[in-house]
Image: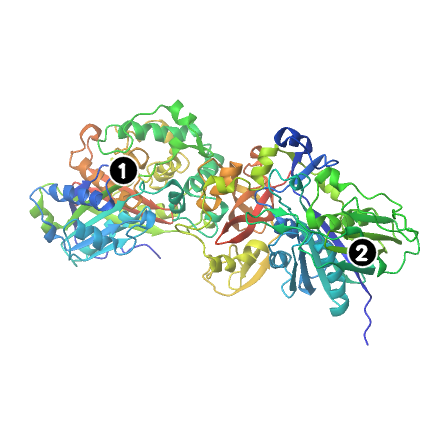
Amino acid sequence: MGVSHPHRPMRDVAIVGAGLSTFGERPESAKHLFNEAVLEALGSVDRGLALKDLEEAYVGSLGFGGGQLGNLAAYMMEQAGAAGVPARRVENACASSGFALRDAYLAVASGACDVAIAGGIEKMNDLTGIHKRFWLGVSGDTEWERLAGLTFPGVYAMMASRHFHEYGTTREHLAHVAVKNHAIGAKNPKAQFRREITLEKALAGPVVAQPFTVFDCCSTTDGASAVIIASAEKARQLTDTPVWIRGSGAATDYLAVHDRKSLTRLDATVKAGRTAFGRAGLTPRDVKVAEVHDCFTIAELLAVEDLGFTEKGQGGPFTASGATSRTGQVAVNPSGGLKAKGHPLGATGTAQAVEVFLQLRGQAGARQVQGAETGLTHNVGGSGATCVVHVYSRSVSG
Amino acid sequence: MSHKPSPGILAMGVAVPRLRVAGSEYPQAWGHYAARGVEEKAVPAFDEDAVTLAAEAALKAVEASGIDPAEIGLVAFATSGADPGAAVVAEVVGARFARLLDVTGRMTAGLAALVAGFDSSEAVRNHTLVVAADVPRAAPGDAAEHPEGAGAAAFLIGPGGHVALHAAGAAAKHEPADRVMDGRGFFRSPEVGADRDALLAQASSTIPAQAVRPDFVLRFPGDLAVPGPDGKPLEGVRAQPDLRKRMGEAGAAQPLLLLAQALNDAAPGTEGLLVGATASTAQVLRLGVLRKPQGTGDVLGALAVAPKRISLLRAMQERGHFAFETGIPEEPMGAYVSLPAFAETLPARLRLLADRCAGCGSLQYPPRPACAECGGREFAPERLSGRGTVYACTIIGRGGAPSEFALQQALTGEYGVAVVELAEGPRVAAQIADLDPAALKIGAPLQAVVRRLYRQQGVTRYGVKFRVLA
């Protein structure tokens, strides 16, 4: 159940264009941010593409704040100048646009269309503080987790408490994730936080939920992202350097952490990763650059373990050793991750794909990972209730 | 005609909050202290109220009695406030066939409920659960606030009970309630009142004269003079227990707390009087003690269990003062749990009812439509023990609370949350009641308690929290 059929014939699919709005506290409304990402994505297509060439649109958004909660995709597309295109909102919490990408991928791979856009949009910082509280954590289990007084910092903090207990992970291990991601995020002109932090500062921040300080947690972010994907034939017409989506895997799990067998593993990540690697015919050892869902520092440690970059329980020492830095064994979150780049919920999944697109094409500037042939994105909804993993390569096979 | 023995008190239970504030804090804060004799008072925590204290005391009484809660025919809840509590108490103890009676708005509500409990048990010849609980709350700065404490006492009455009601007398005037709620949710005393002593004399005149000097004479309020046969104030053989000194005045619960303490200490084969009078009502109960009921009525003993002393300012915050000033709204503005959806979960939250899967035998808690192990859809309800251990935990710092707990956090700061591994196997996320941060560790033993979760749409939502056991 849940594992896709690895041998069912599907067409090859590539990303041909990618765009990202600047992340942070943006004064503009959502439609302007989304338009910014769409325009950049279209402009990045080497031999040009027009809005009218888009056959399908998949827009990921949680709908934070409730603004244009219904018919959001149609609204975003018509405001971006593409009225008429078949569009739909894809909602899977913080994995919304990761799933939007998967849906777009499946549509192209199946032969239903040749060119599709997948994007995401979230506007989080235009609410009053108290209104924002009502919207934070709405993707957790509402009846029990939330009514126990939890939002996601608390849920992930409890997962961290188990990881400490079972594997001896420490607060310093967590802080290494924050330091690394802030260091590289400082080099990303579109990141929300463009400043480095020290280990001492990360450890000394105000406590949000023990053992997390504010530096263990991502922020609330306004932002949008979009990628344009195409069939092999169309992709080769549009660019000489397409980024091939070699595998897509997804899974779901219990919303409430108390219903899961383990708190130190995201089963949805394990399943989605295995499916994506199986599809791609690649292994974790092949991956040179990975954008993983570090909504909290512990989440990055869980991701590098659950995706198979290191053994279960070793995420802390693995990270502290520098293995996940830009020049390490696998560069994890060279964009700065959710931690430093920012986490506009529904926009995060395709924002990760934007970074891998740039990295595999050698266009990532000061944060370029050398020898980035194969990449991965890992997008999680809630505390692991949904997960989608994509594996990408510069080559279409092999 | 079948004959069943007369009803009597079979079992009892008491509950007092763990927090205390010293009376000596008042002169500096308010310039005077209007509760002479009250050395310290019990303060309900932010998540405690009359209903949670009632539930705690009621559960103790029912469990001590050993009876099947389905045999309880009436649950009577008494408080001087306005909010009913019998429904929550009935759910917590599992009295699923009981009629509900809420006696509210009077300081003598507990006495009236107790008499009603005896009457009901006599009439329908089954068990009655009577619980009086109160967290009186006059406005800060009002001298009436100074003596206010909190607590609850519960009595399970049934055929063949150990404490019989020999006689009861009552009198009332057509006057406003003893305490009325003002527009801001504070109690205040009515501006008119009848002669309390005259009402008491009238109530006493309807019951037969005492043959022997009573073992105890419990007076509420304590300065009440109970007329004896010779016209002099009547005194018991044993002095009235001084609960007021140690916990303040627990409103309508006070006379029943006094009774619980007296029954706890009473010798078999004695008699006693329980008397309460206010400006509008008077009640006199004559009780015969065959032997001590099951359970414990030791209020003084309960007060000695792990008290935590807090400042007057903190006490006011725990009482929910300054809630308006936080600016935190009660009405939902985003995702929230509707009242019907919440009500659907009440048996799991208040009674700890899990579902045993008919297909694979696994236990589902919280319950779900399909078994997580085998997909089965047939279940039998099963009550959990409420014992468990900490599987994972955190302490939520300021600003980390969801909107439902934003007010609690704004007023009382950090709180603990755990994934609880229940003794029967299932896990559930729950808040930690009465948090001691140092004691919240993986593996620490826990016990379930019913507490106030939050208030929304004008309805207080109650649910299970867990207390770390020493």
Of discs 1 and 2, which sits in the foreground?
2
What residue lies at 71% left-to-right and 52% top-to-bottom? B193
- The tag on residue B284 is 2
Q: Amino acid at mark 1?
A: Ala
Viewer can see residue A11 = yes
Q: Is residue A185 left or right of residue B277?
A: left
Question: Where does the image place residue A386, in percent across and percent down from the top left?
Answer: 35, 49
Give the residue at the far bottom of this rendering. Answer: B1
Quarter placement of the C terminus of chain A = top left
Task: Tell which of B317 and A250 is nearer to you.
Answer: B317
Q: Which residue is mark 1?
A: A290
- The tag on residue B240 is none
Task: For mark 2, give the secondary structure.
Answer: strand
Q: Is residue B178 left or right of residue B324?
A: right
Q: Are marks 1 and 2 on the same chain?
A: no
What residue lies at 13% left-to-right and 54% top-to-bottom? A114
Disc 1 to disc 2, C-alpha distance: 79 Å
What residue lies at 16% left-to-right and 34% top-to-bottom? A363
What residue lies at 55% left-to-right and 49% top-to-bottom? B183
- Chain ID of residue with mark 1: A
Question: Where does the image place residue B47, in percent across and percent down from the top left?
Answer: 57, 45
